Amino acid sequence: MSPSWTPITDRGPRFRQYVRARQIVLGPMKASIPEDRLRILSYNILAESLAHEFGAHLYRGTSAHELAWDRRCAAFLKEIEAHSPDVLCLQEVDHFTQLKRELAARGYQGRYLKRTGARVDGLAIFWRTARLRQVFMDNIRFAESGLRDNVAQVATFELLPAEEQGREREGSPVPSSPPPSPGRPASLLREEVLQQQRSWAQWQRRRRQAAGEGSGQASPRQPGSDPPGSRGEATSAAAAAAILPFTFIVSNVHVLFNPKRGDVKLAQTRNLLHAVHGASRRAGGAPAVVCGDFNSAAYSDVHCFITSGELGLQAVDRRWASGQVRGGMCVEPEVEGIGRGWYRMRRRLLDELASGVIRGYAPKVPVPWTEEELAVAFARLRSRPGVEEEGGEEFDGAGAGGLNGAGAGVGSSAGGPRSGDWIPDGLPDTDPRRKMLLTHPLTLRSAYQAVTGEEPVWTTCHDGYMGTVDYIFYSLEPNGAPSLEPRGVLLPPVAQSLRSGLPNAHWPSDHVCLVADFDARRA
């Protein structure tokens, strides 16, 4: 079992409340007992390079000592030890080598993906090797779709059988995507795609063999056996699922910050969710957790797109789609004086909480989308051989090295999205793109909303913004399918406890970490 989390007992400035789910939140109570519990942590740790670059603008009330990386790194490690997660999704990582060394001593292994472009920070996923086996790691570089320099990771894990848990493992059974190289010629892209296909084929072959041996049946279909889709085959599949290790997907993303580029935020989010769906399908319909800093406010258009699965762009102004606007919780720190921007935002946030209404801002009449903006929003990843979504649309389900190579069309790396490409010729009137309807194939819900009924009040606070931009979503699975069911979440500190913006002496980043517990349930 995962080490239990020990809450901080004092009611001081570092107090955070852990809330347990009162009942299973995915429909009726299931008779099966949870195989095990998984703890997922998502944390934007504030890259040292960004802390220095924006210190005079966003962290005016933070001393040089409080911004120092060595002090903040030690505080991060203490938090990780206290929460003891099974999977860590970190954003704004620019000291991966140091974190990898420190976390290896604590039983974790990790993978890093640097942002493209001039920035030196990136993403990192770490996992506890005593409990989890990494099956595959997909890397998504949005720049290869003409969608800025942000990146995302999509990892596939297996939960080790109970008799194997506790044994430290070295390495991964399947190689992860190769590191990026300058230029990424077409020959290299094709080789990466072939390597990923071979890796997946090897993993799937091992699972079929394990299922055949465990159920006493030969893996290949024998003459006279149950036909595809029959009740007998479904029973055999259920028996195989009870034998195979529990498999799940975890993705990590840091979406573009620019508050007024909602078109880019939507496109990055949409492509990520299609990639997660592709990874889930290749893993036999594995449940998924989607973590990260989405740079979008709770209940904004971007947030609603994630949780509802669709968004009609006619009523959306892309400048305000993220909800991070001056009319909401964003202010200019210059007008507040040094280190006081956060105080005004905290006061307004508390006033709105007391009134029960969180005010946002949206123009009375949305500005119409241009063809260029629509091309960005509908930009998609290049199709990968053998990966095809329902409805005939193909998407790159893996993302590493397979984004918009030659002939990619919309969002190709040679010039980015082009006007007119978002509606190809000959589309029927019922096609979602005709209706300016942006969609994704997953059914997602926030772990915090599932447990508490709402998103956290805030997850980031500095002199430029206070609000919620970090999330842990999970996929809702049909009855009888393996699933992850949220059982508890860690709330941010109460806003009244803040005496300054973040980072400060108590919190080492301008974000607080999110922690969610899930029950891993088989069919």
Image: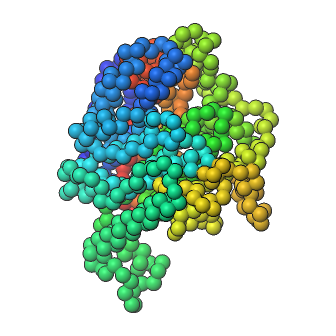
Asked whether 214 or 404 is in front, the reply is: 404
Question: Which residue is located at x 37 percent, y 87 percent?
Answer: 222
* Percent of width and height locating residue 508: 39, 24
Asked whether 235 or 244 is in front, the reply is: 244
* Percent of width and height locating residue 417: 67, 50
Asked whether 57 or 507 is in front, the reply is: 57
Q: Is residue 500 above or below residue 41?
A: above
Q: Is residue 360 left or right of residue 338?
A: right
* Percent of width and height locating residue 399: 50, 55
Question: Which residue is located at x 53 percent, y 60 percent?
Answer: 186
* Percent of width and height locating residue 211: 31, 72
Quarter of the picture containing the C terminus is: bottom left
Question: Which residue is located at x 55 percent, y 18 percent?
Answer: 57
Q: Is residue 389 left or right of residue 236?
A: right
Q: Is residue 88 visible?
A: yes
Q: Residue most toward the top?
A: 337
Q: Is residue 166 above or below residue 211?
A: above
Question: Which residue is located at x 39 percent, y 67 percent?
Answer: 198
- The colour style of the image is rainbow
Q: Residue most toward the bottom?
A: 224
Q: Is residue 447 visible?
A: no
Q: How many marks?
A: 0
